[in-house]
Amino acid sequence: MGGEVTEKTVPIADDDALVRLTSDVVSAYISNNAVPAASLPGLIAEIHASLSKLGKESAVPAAVEAPKPAISVKKSVTDDYLICLEDGKMFKSLKRHLGTHYNLTPDEYRAKWGLPADYPMVAPAYAAARSTLAKKMGLGKKRAENAKASKRGQKATAN
């Protein structure tokens, strides 16, 4: 008993607690909003009724419905674009759209919709075009050529 603090919840059905809660909510509302004196009794009655219903409603949460995609998963991937399952919009790349509009990472998006880990975030034709462009620019070749040249140089100095 010494020094123990226990928190008790007061049932809302208790009239004194209900009146106190109602007065707190009404005073907070009135302090932030202009309310004519004539509508005050109606406001108080409405808040009181709402708070009294809270104590009587069942504690069983409503069944959470699984989200439905804007388009079927099979139709969401085309060669030229991807269709976002969240809103049905077409994109060449989904990553930025998901992050800015839905605050989702690609992995979270895949998990939410039950998509496989290899579900693309970039349209296949776009990825191929970018790959071709990178190869034309010579990206990735310099390292390989430098590595071969340095191996040749090491062999020549070793002799």
Image (cartoon, rainbow, N blue to C red):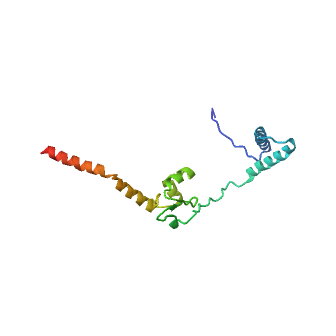
Quarter placement of the N terminus: top right
Total marks in image:
0
Question: Outermost residue toward the left?
Answer: 159
The residue located at (22%, 46%) in the rendering is 150
Q: Where is residue 66 in the image (x, y as percent from the top left)?
A: 59, 61
Question: Outermost residue toward the front?
Answer: 136
In the image, 118: left or right of 16? left
Depth check: give the residue in front, 93 or 47.
93
Q: Where is residue 115 in the image (x, y as percent from the top left)?
A: 49, 61
In the image, 64: left or right of 142? right
In the image, 5: left or right of 126? right
The residue located at (50%, 61%) in the rendering is 82
Q: In which quarter of the image is residue 60?
A: bottom right
Q: Where is residue 139 in the image (x, y as percent from the top left)?
A: 34, 52
Quarter placement of the C terminus: top left
Q: Where is residue 125 in the image (x, y as percent from the top left)?
A: 44, 62
Depth check: give the residue in front, 117 or 123.
123
Depth check: give the residue in front, 116 or 7.
116
Against 3, residue 131 (above or below) is: below
The residue located at (54%, 66%) in the rendering is 72
Q: Quadrant of residue 15?
A: top right
Question: Outermost residue toward the right?
Answer: 38
The residue located at (56%, 65%) in the rendering is 71
